[in-house]
Amino acid sequence: MTVLNHLKTLKRVLQVKYLYKVEVTTPAARRNQKKKTVCPAGDRDQTSSFDQLRNEFVLYRIIGNDLVPRHEKGQSRKNLDFILKNEPDLEGCEKRYIVNRIVDPDEENSIIGMLESAGVQYIHIPFHLDEYQGLPLDHEGVPRKYLPTGELFPQLNAAQQCRIWMRLYRHKNNYVMNNNGARNAALREAKTHAKWALPWDGNCFLTAEAWEVIVADVKKQSECPYFVVPMARIPNNESLLNKDYKPKADEEPQMIFRCDSTEEFDEACYYGRRPKVEMFWRLGIPGKWDHWHIEPWDIPCPDYSKDAGAFAKAGWVARLFSGQAHLEKGSSGLVDRGLARNEAIAALLDKLDGEGFHFRYDATRLCYVPVMASGGTISETLKCTLVSTADEALSRGPYSVVDKKTLPPSKNPHDYWHPAPYFWPIPLPIPGLPYIRKDGKRVPGTRLYESMSDNYDRTRLQRLYDDTFVLTLAGSVSKDERYDVHAANLVRTWFLNPETAMAPHLDYAQVRKGWNKNRGSSSGIIEAKDFYYFLDAVRLLEQRSKLTQSESNAFREWLSKYLHWLRTSPQGVKERASQNNHGTYYDLQVGTIAAFLGEDTLLRHTLRDSRFRIVHQFAADGSQTEELKRTTTAHYCCFNLQGWIHLAQLAESCGEDLWRFEGPQGQSLRRAMEWLLPYLEKEWPYQQIDKFDSERLYPIFYAYLSHYGAMDGFEHLEIPGQEDVKPLFCPHDGIRPFWQLS
């Protein structure tokens, strides 16, 4: 679920209740535990430079991005126009502006044009998409158990989940919004021009009367290096033109800094999560924020500054209308403002992520065998093996789910059907008892290609994947039309012909008798894992016009329905939450199908979330905790890592890099390979009750070599050349046919 979906869900909830009780603290409680004596404002000495500055005050207003729906589109420009036309001259104060990383070029140009026409000085901080695109998510800021793939994340309410997403996007937020960064830029520049610096938000407006009170208060207590100026939220800007108008100022204040003050805003704090309040906490400025929760994923509450207590209050300032009247009043408005603000931030960041991704992504691009599209050559030995394998495939099929010898619990032959491979009947002569699990011991008929597998659909599905892929590869290198014709017929029979087509779901994959009304389990989704290379075969058939346009459209319609089932069915939702290899292969299915269908947002989000899986699945040393719990640990460690190689190749095909991602403790694909590959020459020390094919390590070795270079300590090993390793492994191993062609 995306950040925006969390927010939309929350908007429908009238009273938020915690699903999981998160341990939180508050600044007030924390300070009761660690008290600090604050120094009164009058104990500070002014520096000699204070009286040497020619200006009394410099007001910098920071103009940033409109955040729809928190603001009305163009509201920053409209408020600037109101200020330039209506705000009086402020005695002793020079007005300046900061144009702060506005992402809309038209809005930015309009605002700069207005400032230049008015003859007002400004600092321009530009936005650069390439700089933004290079920023990572803040994986280190969220405790592992609260990450979106963590065990506690689903137990949090929508508001908490949204705040976690906001923390994860902190670096991107800080670049685009540049909230405290722009404040500090204004503060530093203002201190060189005046005795008093006002680094204020762009929607602040001062009436002549309000300014007189501020100046009088500051001069009366000029020994204070800091002042807070309470803010009044204005529902109608025109009311400020009434000389007698004085609203109630009880909103989060703006601040004034003496030129010799030392505190600056913390640029680690991000917009939408108390960036200015952090300064209040340091200075000991009291307010409702002292009782706000500090959650486990928040930036920690700061200690008192040495200047704590050195502040006073001065006058008031108006906050101009946001363009959204329903968000401006009452306690419900406060809650809704927060939701709308986070929704707007999420929407803007997602839009920017999408713009960069869109330039790198092409739905027609082959993800796994680009050499076939570019006309690359392969060795004669590999080519002969490929053609020979394709010739065997010509003698098989086409395949259909209606050909199985037994029916699923639904009694519909079009439903894919396969029993759970490790669940056996209880050895008691009592009918109706639920089956029991024997990890690593397969039920007869659930092993690929064995005679009894004709009872079910798993072997046929694998034949579909493998034969279609091999035939299209052979068609690429041999130019023999027979291969493409047969491959296209395999696709038609399994997906398009109404008499033979599979229903677009896996409701009866890995059924455990006596459980869940004899419906399939989430783990059954992994049986369709090999869509990832099969879809490259379909791309090749389409590029060579072996499928008509109407057939391609019908296939995409089938695939769209299946993808919807993957993402919304109880099985799919549970599989996505899986902590082991099932989660990896779920992402691989969703990602490759999204890539094929042109669902670039879903593809981008899937690749984003896969980084959280790396943090969860791999220990700091590269071991795989979940896979080492199994009875066939060598198999599952290789199988899961092989899935990650496929995901990284998918990411690479659209300009994303999983190969070099590192988690907070160094969790990475590289370290996982470096943990596993030494067992090329060492005995496997963990439980493995089945025979294990050690050659499965060679594709992982060559993936490492191609992305990280030679691995230290392997110089003495006699490893066969890449094309000398067998091109065909058991499909249970997770290695695609002719894996060398990548």
Image (tube, rainbow, N blue to C red):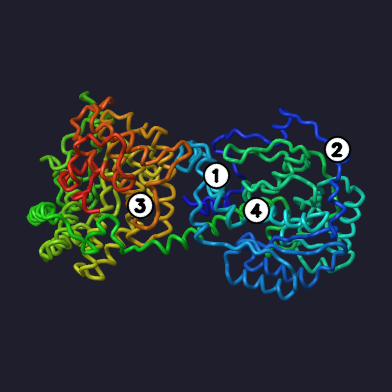
Residue at left offset 69%, top offset 32%:
30
Question: Residue 138 vs residue 328: left or right?
Answer: left
Give the mark, 1 or 2, whose residue is nearer the N terminus: 2
Tell me the crowding category of disc 3: few under 14, some 14 to 19, or many 20 or more residues within 10 angstroms, Cα based: many
Q: Position of residue 28 (x, y in %)?
A: 73, 35
Q: Position of residue 573 (x, y in %)?
A: 40, 45
* Residue to which mark 4 is pinned: 181
Kind of residue sitting beneath label 2: Pro
- Looking at the picture, tell me which residue is in the foreground, 347 or 565: 347
Task: Please indicate, yes or no, whether residue 433 appears anywhere in the rendered image.
Answer: no
Q: Secondary structure at mark 1?
A: helix
Kind of residue sitting beneath label 3: Val
Give the mark, 2 or 4, whose residue is nearer the N terminus: 2
Kind of residue sitting beneath label 4: Gly
Q: Position of residue 347 (x, y in %)?
A: 54, 58
Q: CA distance from mark 3 to mark 2?
A: 60 Å
Are discs 2 and 4 less than 8 Å apart at CB? no
Q: CA distance from mark 2 to mark 4?
A: 29 Å
Indicate which disc residue 164 carries.
1
Q: Secondary structure at mark 3?
A: helix
Give the mark, 1 or 4, whose residue is nearer the N terminus: 1
Q: Secondary structure at mark 4?
A: helix
Q: CA distance from mark 3 to mark 1?
A: 23 Å
* Residue to which mark 3 is pinned: 590
* Residue to which mark 2 is pinned: 40
